[in-house]
Amino acid sequence: SLTSLAQLDTCVSVVDATTVLDYFDSEKLLGEQFTKETDASEGSNADKPVTDLLVDQIEFANVILLNKSNMVSVETLSKVEGLIKKLNPDAFLIRSNYSKVPLNRILNTGLFSMEKALKAPGWLQSLKEVHTPETIEYGIMSHIFRARRPFHPGRLSELLLKYFLIIHEYEDDDEDD
């Protein structure tokens, strides 16, 4: 099972300071905003307001990155922070630009608690219902890159090591000595 390989340490949500208030003032539906008309499948929540997704993500997070905070006025930033704190007063709120944040603020924090998560708004109701994966519920799409020529392993490794946190674990081959 996944729990034997990994543990959920921190739930981080990224909020765009430049658009979040517009979404809360809007009646846009997920299907209108994030999916093409042909992509809306049966069982998807294309007819749910975008605000439902935003509220779900903000309420559940342990850490909220308020991204693009340098692109809004102090007044707007104050309103956004007030909204976030009302929805989730326990979350750590971190202002960021380009989602740059010290890794120790979001990794190995130990902030996630399953007991607390089960008591969070929406969880009791979702446990009673048939679970719909978020990819279907919110119309989240993915893309698969395919090419005849493979990536150059050295350049790909350099790119990943430069921009992503990668932990290498090696087995010790000298144990038999």
Image (tube, grey):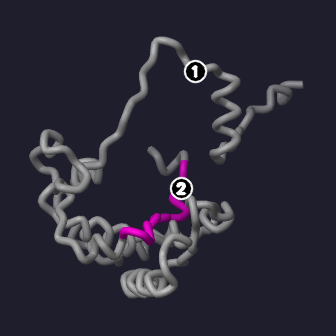
What SS does tag 2 mark?
loop
Looking at the picture, how far across and down is residue 166, in whole percent?
66, 43
Which segment is the magenta one? Answer: 6-19
- Spot occupied by residue 153 in the image (x, y as percentages of width and height): 65, 22
Label 1 Cα crowd, 10 Å radius (few <14 / some 14-19 / many 20+): few
Q: Quadrant of the C terminus?
A: top right
Position above or below: 10 against 88:
above
Q: Amino acid at mark 2?
A: Gln
Instruction: Give the foreground label among 1 and 2.
Output: 1
Residue that label 1 marks = 151
The answer to whether any part of residue 146 appears in the image is yes
Q: Residue visible at 30% across and 77% down?
A: 121
Neighbor class of circle 2 (other Cα within 10 Å; few <14, some 14-19, many 20+) is few
Residue that appears at 68% across and 26% down: 155
Where does label 2 land, which residue?
Answer: 7
Q: Split into 4 quadrants, where in the image is the N terminus?
A: top left
Towards the viewer: 167 or 35: 35
Instruction: Name the secondary structure under disc 1.
Output: loop
Between disc 1 and disc 2, whose residue precedes? 2
Q: Position of residue 114 (x, y in %)?
A: 44, 69
Q: Residue at x 64, y 37 (%)?
A: 160
- Vertical position of residue 152 compared to residue 132: above or below: above
Q: Quadrant of residue 106?
A: bottom right
Is residue 84 placed above or below 71 in the rendered structure? below
Q: CA gap, disc 1 to disc 2?
A: 30 Å
Q: Position of residue 54 (x, y in %)?
A: 32, 68
- Residue 67 falls within the magenta-colored stretch: no
Can residue 131 be seen here? The reply is no
Q: Is residue 88 above or below residue 45?
A: below
**Image mark count:** 2
User: What is the quadrant of residue 107 in the picture?
Assistant: bottom right
